Amino acid sequence: MDKWIIPQDWNQYAPSEHAMWDTLFARQVAMLSGRAAPAFLEGIDVLRMSKPGIPDFDELSERLHKATGWSVVAVPGLIPDEVFFENLANRRFVAGRFIRTPEQIDYLREPDVFHDVFGHAPLLVHPVFADYMQAYGQGGLRSMQYGSIQRLARLYWYTVEFGLIRDGDGLKLYGAGIVSSSSESRYALESDSPNRLGFDLKRIMRTKYRIDDFQQDYFVIDSFEQLLRETLETDFGPLYSELESLPEIEISTILPTDRVLTHGTQVYASRQR
Ligand code: PHE
Ligand code: FE
Protein backbone atom coordinates (compact mmCIF):
# COMPACT_ATOMS: atom_id res chain seq x y z
CA MET A 1 0.00 0.00 0.00
CA ASP A 2 2.94 2.35 0.63
CA LYS A 3 4.07 2.31 -2.95
CA TRP A 4 1.23 4.70 -3.87
CA ILE A 5 2.30 7.32 -1.39
CA ILE A 6 4.37 10.20 -2.74
CA PRO A 7 6.18 13.04 -0.98
CA GLN A 8 4.09 16.20 -0.75
CA ASP A 9 7.15 18.29 -1.69
CA TRP A 10 5.75 21.24 0.17
CA ASN A 11 8.73 23.40 -0.85
CA GLN A 12 7.83 22.95 -4.50
CA TYR A 13 4.54 24.87 -4.34
CA ALA A 14 4.60 28.19 -6.18
CA PRO A 15 3.53 31.38 -4.39
CA SER A 16 0.48 31.49 -6.68
CA GLU A 17 -0.54 28.04 -5.45
CA HIS A 18 -0.36 29.10 -1.81
CA ALA A 19 -2.32 32.22 -2.76
CA MET A 20 -5.03 30.07 -4.33
CA TRP A 21 -5.35 28.14 -1.07
CA ASP A 22 -5.61 31.40 0.90
CA THR A 23 -8.35 32.70 -1.38
CA LEU A 24 -10.36 29.49 -1.11
CA PHE A 25 -9.76 29.25 2.63
CA ALA A 26 -10.92 32.81 3.37
CA ARG A 27 -14.02 32.39 1.23
CA GLN A 28 -15.02 29.08 2.82
CA VAL A 29 -14.39 30.12 6.40
CA ALA A 30 -16.68 33.11 5.89
CA MET A 31 -19.29 30.95 4.19
CA LEU A 32 -19.20 28.22 6.83
CA SER A 33 -19.62 30.21 10.01
CA GLY A 34 -23.12 29.31 11.12
CA ARG A 35 -23.44 26.71 8.35
CA ALA A 36 -20.85 24.02 9.12
CA ALA A 37 -21.19 21.58 12.01
CA PRO A 38 -19.48 22.96 15.15
CA ALA A 39 -17.14 19.92 15.14
CA PHE A 40 -15.89 20.87 11.68
CA LEU A 41 -15.10 24.47 12.70
CA GLU A 42 -13.40 23.21 15.83
CA GLY A 43 -11.23 20.91 13.72
CA ILE A 44 -10.05 23.92 11.68
CA ASP A 45 -8.94 25.56 14.92
CA VAL A 46 -7.26 22.51 16.41
CA LEU A 47 -5.35 21.92 13.18
CA ARG A 48 -4.38 25.64 13.03
CA MET A 49 -5.51 25.72 9.44
CA SER A 50 -5.77 29.50 9.38
CA LYS A 51 -1.98 29.57 9.01
CA PRO A 52 -1.48 30.98 5.48
CA GLY A 53 -0.61 28.72 2.58
CA ILE A 54 -1.24 25.12 1.63
CA PRO A 55 -0.81 23.07 4.81
CA ASP A 56 2.37 21.06 5.17
CA PHE A 57 1.11 17.48 5.55
CA ASP A 58 3.81 16.62 8.11
CA GLU A 59 2.81 19.50 10.34
CA LEU A 60 -0.88 18.77 9.87
CA SER A 61 -0.36 15.08 10.61
CA GLU A 62 1.46 15.89 13.82
CA ARG A 63 -1.57 17.80 15.13
CA LEU A 64 -4.01 15.25 13.83
CA HIS A 65 -2.02 12.43 15.32
CA LYS A 66 -2.12 14.05 18.74
CA ALA A 67 -5.88 14.42 18.50
CA THR A 68 -7.03 11.06 17.12
CA GLY A 69 -4.07 9.13 15.72
CA TRP A 70 -4.83 10.05 12.09
CA SER A 71 -2.36 11.37 9.53
CA VAL A 72 -2.56 12.80 6.01
CA VAL A 73 -0.38 11.46 3.19
CA ALA A 74 -0.05 12.50 -0.45
CA VAL A 75 -1.01 10.34 -3.45
CA PRO A 76 -0.65 11.07 -7.17
CA GLY A 77 -4.39 11.15 -7.92
CA LEU A 78 -6.86 8.32 -8.20
CA ILE A 79 -5.65 5.16 -6.51
CA PRO A 80 -7.09 1.61 -6.44
CA ASP A 81 -10.04 1.11 -4.05
CA GLU A 82 -8.11 -1.40 -2.03
CA VAL A 83 -5.30 1.07 -1.36
CA PHE A 84 -7.79 3.75 -0.38
CA PHE A 85 -9.58 1.40 2.04
CA GLU A 86 -6.37 0.04 3.51
CA ASN A 87 -5.10 3.52 4.27
CA LEU A 88 -8.35 4.49 5.98
CA ALA A 89 -8.29 1.27 7.97
CA ASN A 90 -4.87 2.37 9.22
CA ARG A 91 -6.04 5.88 10.02
CA ARG A 92 -4.26 7.47 7.11
CA PHE A 93 -6.15 9.87 4.92
CA VAL A 94 -4.84 10.04 1.35
CA ALA A 95 -4.87 13.46 -0.27
CA GLY A 96 -4.00 14.96 -3.64
CA ARG A 97 -1.05 17.38 -3.52
CA PHE A 98 -2.03 19.56 -6.50
CA ILE A 99 -4.24 22.63 -6.21
CA ARG A 100 -6.82 23.87 -8.70
CA THR A 101 -6.01 26.66 -11.15
CA PRO A 102 -7.79 30.04 -11.07
CA GLU A 103 -10.04 28.87 -13.95
CA GLN A 104 -11.15 25.95 -11.80
CA ILE A 105 -11.86 27.98 -8.69
CA ASP A 106 -15.55 27.09 -8.58
CA TYR A 107 -15.60 23.64 -10.05
CA LEU A 108 -13.24 20.80 -10.72
CA ARG A 109 -13.88 17.12 -11.13
CA GLU A 110 -10.88 15.48 -9.50
CA PRO A 111 -10.35 16.29 -5.84
CA ASP A 112 -7.44 18.67 -5.21
CA VAL A 113 -5.61 19.45 -1.99
CA PHE A 114 -8.23 22.03 -1.01
CA HIS A 115 -11.06 19.55 -1.22
CA ASP A 116 -9.06 16.74 0.37
CA VAL A 117 -7.44 18.67 3.20
CA PHE A 118 -9.82 21.53 3.95
CA GLY A 119 -12.85 19.33 3.29
CA HIS A 120 -11.81 16.13 5.04
CA ALA A 121 -9.12 16.80 7.65
CA PRO A 122 -11.05 18.92 10.20
CA LEU A 123 -13.57 16.22 11.11
CA LEU A 124 -10.81 13.66 11.61
CA VAL A 125 -10.16 15.59 14.83
CA HIS A 126 -13.56 14.45 16.12
CA PRO A 127 -13.04 11.12 17.94
CA VAL A 128 -16.30 9.54 16.80
CA PHE A 129 -16.01 10.63 13.20
CA ALA A 130 -12.38 9.50 13.24
CA ASP A 131 -13.53 6.03 14.28
CA TYR A 132 -16.22 6.03 11.60
CA MET A 133 -13.66 6.72 8.87
CA GLN A 134 -11.46 3.88 10.06
CA ALA A 135 -14.44 1.52 10.29
CA TYR A 136 -15.40 2.57 6.79
CA GLY A 137 -11.96 1.53 5.52
CA GLN A 138 -12.26 -1.85 7.21
CA GLY A 139 -15.78 -2.20 5.81
CA GLY A 140 -14.44 -1.28 2.38
CA LEU A 141 -11.92 -4.11 2.41
CA ARG A 142 -14.72 -6.44 3.42
CA SER A 143 -17.08 -5.15 0.72
CA MET A 144 -14.54 -6.24 -1.90
CA GLN A 145 -15.10 -9.87 -0.94
CA TYR A 146 -18.81 -9.43 -1.58
CA GLY A 147 -18.37 -7.52 -4.84
CA SER A 148 -20.33 -4.71 -3.20
CA ILE A 149 -17.92 -1.77 -3.31
CA GLN A 150 -20.43 0.31 -5.24
CA ARG A 151 -23.08 -0.03 -2.53
CA LEU A 152 -20.64 0.90 0.19
CA ALA A 153 -19.39 3.81 -1.92
CA ARG A 154 -22.91 5.27 -1.77
CA LEU A 155 -22.67 5.36 1.99
CA TYR A 156 -19.42 7.34 1.72
CA TRP A 157 -20.99 9.66 -0.82
CA TYR A 158 -24.10 10.45 1.21
CA THR A 159 -22.25 10.83 4.52
CA VAL A 160 -18.54 11.69 4.28
CA GLU A 161 -18.92 13.71 1.06
CA PHE A 162 -22.45 15.16 1.14
CA GLY A 163 -23.82 14.59 4.62
CA LEU A 164 -25.93 17.01 6.65
CA ILE A 165 -26.31 16.82 10.42
CA ARG A 166 -29.09 18.00 12.70
CA ASP A 167 -28.16 20.81 15.08
CA GLY A 168 -30.98 21.69 17.46
CA ASP A 169 -33.90 22.70 15.25
CA GLY A 170 -31.70 23.39 12.27
CA LEU A 171 -29.32 21.59 9.94
CA LYS A 172 -25.59 21.97 9.51
CA LEU A 173 -23.07 20.84 6.90
CA TYR A 174 -20.41 18.21 7.47
CA GLY A 175 -19.83 16.50 4.08
CA ALA A 176 -16.43 17.37 2.56
CA GLY A 177 -17.88 17.81 -0.93
CA ILE A 178 -20.21 20.48 0.40
CA VAL A 179 -17.94 22.33 2.80
CA SER A 180 -15.21 22.67 0.16
CA SER A 181 -17.66 24.20 -2.34
CA SER A 182 -18.83 27.76 -1.92
CA SER A 183 -21.96 27.43 -4.05
CA GLU A 184 -23.04 24.04 -2.70
CA SER A 185 -22.56 25.21 0.90
CA ARG A 186 -25.40 27.64 0.39
CA TYR A 187 -27.52 25.40 -1.84
CA ALA A 188 -27.35 22.33 0.40
CA LEU A 189 -28.81 24.22 3.36
CA GLU A 190 -30.91 26.97 1.84
CA SER A 191 -32.25 25.89 -1.54
CA ASP A 192 -35.84 24.66 -1.88
CA SER A 193 -34.73 22.34 -4.65
CA PRO A 194 -33.16 19.24 -3.07
CA ASN A 195 -34.79 16.60 -0.89
CA ARG A 196 -33.47 16.32 2.66
CA LEU A 197 -34.20 12.92 4.14
CA GLY A 198 -33.44 11.23 7.44
CA PHE A 199 -30.41 8.92 7.43
CA ASP A 200 -31.36 5.38 6.41
CA LEU A 201 -28.46 3.00 5.87
CA LYS A 202 -30.18 0.42 3.70
CA ARG A 203 -31.95 3.03 1.62
CA ILE A 204 -28.76 4.96 1.00
CA MET A 205 -26.99 1.85 -0.25
CA ARG A 206 -29.70 1.50 -2.91
CA THR A 207 -29.68 5.14 -3.99
CA LYS A 208 -27.89 6.36 -7.10
CA TYR A 209 -25.97 9.62 -6.96
CA ARG A 210 -24.77 12.28 -9.33
CA ILE A 211 -21.16 13.36 -9.49
CA ASP A 212 -21.44 16.24 -11.94
CA ASP A 213 -23.63 18.84 -10.23
CA PHE A 214 -25.30 19.80 -6.95
CA GLN A 215 -26.95 16.87 -5.21
CA GLN A 216 -30.71 16.38 -5.49
CA ASP A 217 -30.90 14.33 -2.30
CA TYR A 218 -29.18 14.89 1.02
CA PHE A 219 -29.35 12.55 4.01
CA VAL A 220 -29.39 13.97 7.50
CA ILE A 221 -27.83 12.24 10.50
CA ASP A 222 -28.83 13.09 14.08
CA SER A 223 -25.26 12.81 15.36
CA PHE A 224 -21.89 11.27 14.53
CA GLU A 225 -22.60 8.79 17.32
CA GLN A 226 -25.70 7.61 15.46
CA LEU A 227 -23.71 7.24 12.25
CA LEU A 228 -20.98 5.20 13.91
CA ARG A 229 -23.36 3.09 15.98
CA GLU A 230 -25.68 2.13 13.13
CA THR A 231 -22.88 1.26 10.73
CA LEU A 232 -20.89 -0.68 13.33
CA GLU A 233 -23.89 -2.60 14.65
CA THR A 234 -24.97 -3.69 11.19
CA ASP A 235 -23.31 -6.70 9.64
CA PHE A 236 -23.09 -5.61 6.01
CA GLY A 237 -22.57 -9.18 4.74
CA PRO A 238 -26.24 -10.26 4.82
CA LEU A 239 -27.25 -6.72 3.86
CA TYR A 240 -25.23 -6.87 0.63
CA SER A 241 -26.92 -10.16 -0.27
CA GLU A 242 -30.36 -8.77 0.50
CA LEU A 243 -29.72 -5.68 -1.58
CA GLU A 244 -28.93 -7.81 -4.64
CA SER A 245 -32.61 -8.58 -5.03
CA LEU A 246 -33.89 -5.05 -4.37
CA PRO A 247 -34.17 -2.44 -7.15
CA GLU A 248 -31.95 0.62 -7.19
CA ILE A 249 -33.54 3.89 -6.17
CA GLU A 250 -33.39 6.69 -8.72
CA ILE A 251 -32.16 10.14 -7.76
CA SER A 252 -34.84 12.47 -6.29
CA THR A 253 -37.31 9.66 -5.52
CA ILE A 254 -39.24 9.93 -2.27
CA LEU A 255 -40.42 6.66 -0.74
CA PRO A 256 -43.31 6.18 1.69
CA THR A 257 -40.77 4.93 4.23
CA ASP A 258 -38.59 8.07 4.02
CA ARG A 259 -38.37 10.47 6.92
CA VAL A 260 -38.83 13.63 4.88
CA LEU A 261 -37.35 16.84 6.28
CA THR A 262 -37.64 18.76 3.02
CA HIS A 263 -39.62 17.61 0.02
CA GLY A 264 -37.59 19.39 -2.64
CA THR A 265 -39.06 21.20 -5.65
CA GLN A 266 -36.17 19.85 -7.81
CA VAL A 267 -36.40 23.11 -9.73
CA TYR A 268 -32.62 23.51 -9.85
CA ALA A 269 -32.07 20.09 -11.42
CA SER A 270 -34.84 20.48 -13.99
CA ARG A 271 -33.40 23.83 -15.16
CA GLN A 272 -30.01 22.22 -15.80
CA ARG A 273 -31.38 19.82 -18.42
N1 PHE B 1 -20.27 -2.95 9.85
C1 PHE B 1 -19.75 -2.89 8.51
C2 PHE B 1 -19.57 -4.31 7.91
O1 PHE B 1 -20.04 -5.28 8.44
C3 PHE B 1 -18.44 -2.13 8.45
C4 PHE B 1 -18.63 -0.66 8.33
C5 PHE B 1 -18.49 0.18 9.42
C6 PHE B 1 -18.93 -0.10 7.11
C7 PHE B 1 -18.66 1.54 9.28
C8 PHE B 1 -19.09 1.27 6.96
C9 PHE B 1 -18.94 2.09 8.05
O2 PHE B 1 -18.99 -4.45 6.85
FE1 FE C 1 -13.60 13.75 -0.89
Image (cartoon, grey):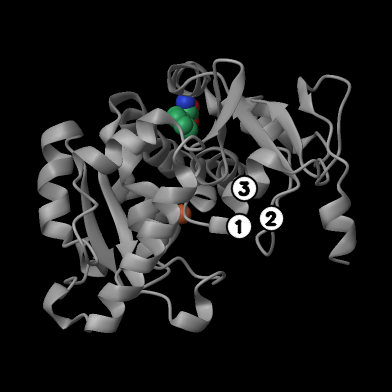
The residue tagged 1 is: 183
User: Disc 1 versus disc 2: distance between alpha carbons?
Assistant: 9 Å
Quadrant where the image shows the C terminus: bottom right
Q: Quadrant of residue 212?
A: bottom right
The residue tagged 3 is: 186
Residue 215 as seen in the image, left or right of residue 80: right
Q: Quadrant of residue 262?
A: top right
In this view of the protein, which residue sits in the foreground, 75 or 86?
A: 75
Residue positioned most to the front = 30
Please say if the residues under marks 3 and 1 sit with CB atoms less than 8 Å apart: yes
What amino acid does circle 2 point to?
Answer: Phe
Q: Indicate whether 243 appears above or below 153.
A: above
Q: Which residue is drawn at 32% across and 48% down?
A: 86
Residue 266, position in %: x, y?
A: 86, 47
Q: Which residue is drawn at 28% across and 38% down?
A: 43
In this view of the protein, which residue sits in the foreground, 61 or 271?
A: 271
Residue 189 as seen in the image, left or right of residue 71: right
Mark 2 or 3, closer to the camera: 3
Please say if the residues under marks 2 and 3 sit with CB atoms less than 8 Å apart: no
Sequence-first tag of 2 and 3: 3
Label 2 CA crowd tier, 10 Å (few <14, some 14–19, many 20+): some
Please say if the residues under marks 1 and 2 sit with CB atoms less than 8 Å apart: yes
User: Disc 2 versus disc 3: distance between alpha carbons?
Assistant: 11 Å
The residue tagged 2 is: 214
Q: Is residue 40 visible?
A: yes
Secondary structure beneath label 1: helix
What amino acid does circle 3 point to?
Answer: Arg
Label 1 CA crowd tier, 10 Å (few <14, some 14–19, many 20+): some
Q: Indicate whether 206 appears above or below 25.
A: above
The yes-or-no answer for disc 1 within 8 Å of ligand 2 is no
